[in-house]
Amino acid sequence: MVIVMLGAPGTGKGTVAGILKDELKIPQVSTGDIFRKHIKEGTELGKLAESYISKGNLVPDEVTNGIVESRLDDSDVKNGIILDGYPRTVNQAEELDKMLEKREKKVDLVVNLTTPEEEIVERIVNRRICSNHDCKTVYNLILNPPKEEGICDKCGCNLIQRKDDTIETVKSRLDNYFKQTSPLVEYYEKTGKLFSAVVSQSINKLGKDVAKDIIDFLN
Ligand code: ADP
Ligand code: ZN
């Protein structure tokens, strides 16, 4: 089962993917997390990625496609993968189709999340993430705060704020989403694999509710 998570930054891709990972027992692979790990470790790839990410721009397709393709051959993703934040351009979507075809797989489900723009900005600046790489649970100081300030409910590790979760960077991340990523909605609509859902406080629907809808839909 290959699941693709689509949606602007701050719509809850990571939250929904994290729940699906636990419920469906399929690994969640976030290209953003892979880049952040390299940045933390100071690798060459990390340095390159940081120069784009810090400005709110996308890392070039050749780089990103290569990372995903090599990840597809790891044994833990043999039975399925939840791609969280990939593809993000039409080129990436086309390359993904080719990579999967070579491995006799295909995209089975595309989850497309949308959230009103004013909510997105508020969510991103209030977002906190578990620093434990094996946990990475996402919290929101307003919508979904941890029981104890600064501490992950699940594993007890410290919560951190992402460097690119600032008002300044959010603006370009959103612009880039609408220019480069939103055409993928149409790309996948044609395949009949698209599951669209609104994540918004205004209709009382959070990521966890949408995750439940997806699991019901799959059953
Ligand atoms: P968000 O969805 O909140 O922007 P991510 O963790 O998915 O967070 O991505 C963080 C940053 O990493 C993006 O702003 C972008 O610079 C880079 N990135 C992640 N995935 C991709 C991708 N598929 N292609 C290019 N750049 C990516
Ligand atoms: Zn944790």
Image: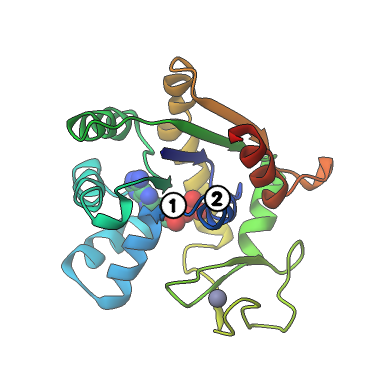
Name the quadrant of the C terminus. Answer: top right
Residue at horizontal 29 percent and vertical 50 percent from the top: 59
| Residue 115 falls left or right of residue 4 | right
The kind of residue on which mark 2 rests is: Leu
Badges 2 and 1: C-beta atoms under 8 Å apart?
yes
Can I make out residue 55 in this image? no
Q: Quadrant of residue 145?
A: bottom right
The kind of residue on which mark 1 rests is: Ile
In what quadrant does ligand 2 lie? bottom right
Q: Residue furthest top?
A: 190
Q: What separation in Å lies between label 2 and label 1 (alpha carbons)?
A: 8 Å
In the image, residue 65 above or below residue 208: above
Can I make out residue 133 in this image? yes
Q: Is mark 2 within 8 Å of ligand 1?
A: no
Q: Earlier in the sequence, mark 2 or mark 1?
A: 2
Of 32 and 207, which appears nearest the observer? 207
In the rendering, at what x and y percent does residue 179 appear? 44, 31
- To which residue does mark 1 refer? 26
Residue at horizontal 61 percent and vertical 30 percent from the top: 196
